[in-house]
Amino acid sequence: MGTAVMTEWTTETSPRTKARITGLFYLLTILTGLFAQGFVSGKLVVGGDAAATATNILTHRGLFQLGFAVYLIEMACQIAVTALFYDLLKPAGRSVSLLAAFLGLAGCVIKTFSRVFFIAPLFVLGGAHYLSTFSTEQLQALALLLLKVNDHGTGMALVFFGFYAPLTGYLIIRSTFLPRFLGCIRRSHTVYCPTF
């Protein structure tokens, strides 16, 4: 879709349609996050037990890779939500909407980058020849360390989302076309589910 077509679509689309699309992407963000964090990480990562975590990852390699893919889908949906909220809430306060968008996108970039550390244990545990100088225990410990770095990177991103959520909530309350109770819910929404 070209820039001109996207601009034309954005200007022609009603706020109600944009709000529904935003809600759909928001729902997808929540569902993909719950699946990847709650099901995949919750099932495979055993906090404090590097050997069990490594065994789970290698035994369920496909599920682990699916979790990574779903994490990336989650972040693509979150970026879409951020962009759509910016466009949708500009009339309620252009400067605040722009600030919220920058904070939201900064959180998305940090969280997406931290996901590199989520998939890295597959490379560490993959049995590559150049890793033969490390013992099995060292590789397992390194894999768990990488997962912890992923988790802490996600926590850093939530600082930005923690500022983004109340700003969008404020704009929703100020808007004339969205129910105000959504703004109150949005302002109080920032949930973090650590793996460890």
Image (cartoon, grey):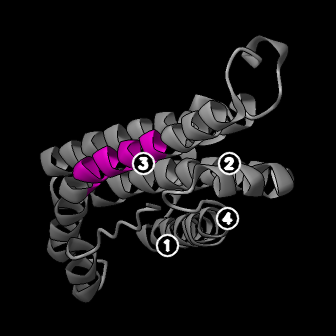
Residue 171 percent across, percent down from the top left? 19, 65
Disc 2 marks a residue whose amino acid type is Phe
- As helix, strand or loop, the secondary structure at mark 3 comes to helix
**Mark 4 residue type:** Val
Q: Is residue 154 left or right of residue 63?
A: left
Marks 2 and 3: which is nearer the front?
Answer: 2
Depth check, front residue: 12 or 112: 112
Q: Residue at x 23, y 43 (%)?
A: 98
Which residue is disc 2 drawn over? 68
Please name the amino acid that badge 1 sits on. Gly
* Residue 153 locus on image (x, y percent): 38, 42
How far apart marks 2 and 4 lie (CA) works out to: 9 Å
Callouts 2 and 3 close, C-beta under 8 Å: no
Alpha carbon distance from label 3 to label 4 = 28 Å
Q: Which residue is mark 1?
A: 23
Discs 2/4, front: 4
Instruction: State the residue position of label 4.
Output: 40
Closest to the observer, 26 or 162 = 162
Which quadrant would the N terminus be assigned to in this image?
Answer: top right
Q: Which quadrant of the figure has residue 25? A: bottom right
Q: How packed is label 3: few (under 14 Cα within 10 Å), some, or many (20 or more)?
A: some
Question: Residue 128, position in %: x, y?
Answer: 82, 20
The residue beneath circle 3 is 83
Identify the magenta region.
148-161
Q: Is residue 160 magenta?
A: yes
Q: Earlier in the sequence, mark 2 or mark 1?
A: 1
Q: Secondary structure at mark 4?
A: helix
Q: Nearer the viewer, mark 3 or mark 4?
A: 4
Rendered residue at 62%/65% (across/down): 32
* First-in-chain label (2 vs 4): 4
